Amino acid sequence: MRVLLWLGWVGVGAAAVGCAEIVEVPEAGPGPGVGLPSQGGGVDARPPSPPPGGGIDAAVQAIDARVIPMADAAVPDATMRFDVGLADGGSPADQSVRDQAVDQAVPDLAPDMCPLETCNGVDDDCDGQVDEDAPCPCPRVAFQQTSLLFCADQRTWPDARVACQQAGYDLVVVQDAAQDAVIYGEMRSRGFGDTWIGVNDRQNEGQWVWLDGIPVAYQHWDSGEPNNGGGGEDCGLIMTSRNRETEWDDRPCGGQRPFVCGVPPAP
């Protein structure tokens, strides 16, 4: 009887690759060894012969004795799921027999691909949220599928950026009006004054970018800003002062201010 031996998925997400082999399994009783894929390719007839029972029992024992150790050695970090499927000659009853045999004989070899969440700007535990319940250095606020840190510790713009980077973040890149409004609302609720964000023209005067060169698409400058008034105003912030609240302004980068960190956009 021919049996389709499903070796499992190797890889994660869209990069995963399925592996399977068709092997020969004796119907019952003693006989020649079970044909299994060898590590060097081809078929390895492994003695001794399978015990009486043949069929599914022999295939399950083959997985347990030969394929599982080989898979563990070859792909220790991949999530492996094993199954036995009848390639031909099966009947509706074969499905339940197969499932029961596999459940009893094949251990769960899936390693923990998603560790506990840590504060690093990454969804470590694979639940679609970034850094929830992680010990971040500043209060965290979820925004859509990402995360923001609101840091009351007042620092210069360069020092604020270093502090964000140490947590796996960077100074926030404000991408649209919705995010801008959330940031301002959190600033006010926390009693922040004017607050650093990631926009700057430190490299080239008058050429405003996010961080190290991300183009500025969305912007919310106050009327007449940025104007480099007095010179050296190379770093951007969100204002909270009366009649200028929510607007952006350019200021000298050495000012000590609270700051907002965000997960850096993908390149």
Image: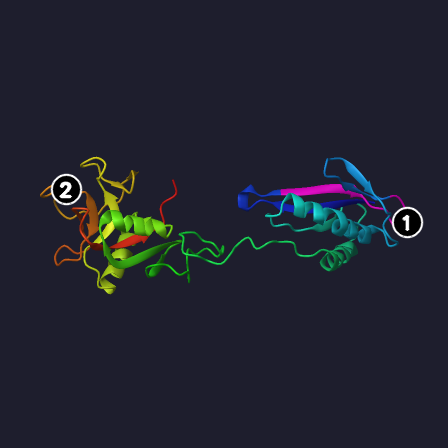
- Which mark's residue is nearer the viewer, 1 or 2? 2
Q: Determine which of the numbered discs, if any, sits on residue 243 in the image.
A: none
Q: Which residues are magenta?
A: 18-32
Residue 101 falls left or right of residue 187? right
> How far is disc 1 from disc 2 in space, using C-alphas?
87 Å
Find the residue positioned furthest to the right: 30
Q: Residues within 10 Å of mark 1 (few under 14, many from 20)?
A: some
Magenta stretch holds residue 246: no
Residue shown at 18%/48% (left/top)? 254
Tag 2: amino acid:
Gly
Q: Nearer the viewer, residue 243 or 134?
A: 134
Q: Which residue is mark 2?
A: 232
Q: Report if residue 174 is visible in the image.
A: no
Residue 89 pos. (x, y %):
81, 47
Residue 208 pos. (x, y %):
22, 39
Q: Nearer the viewer, residue 184 or 235?
A: 235
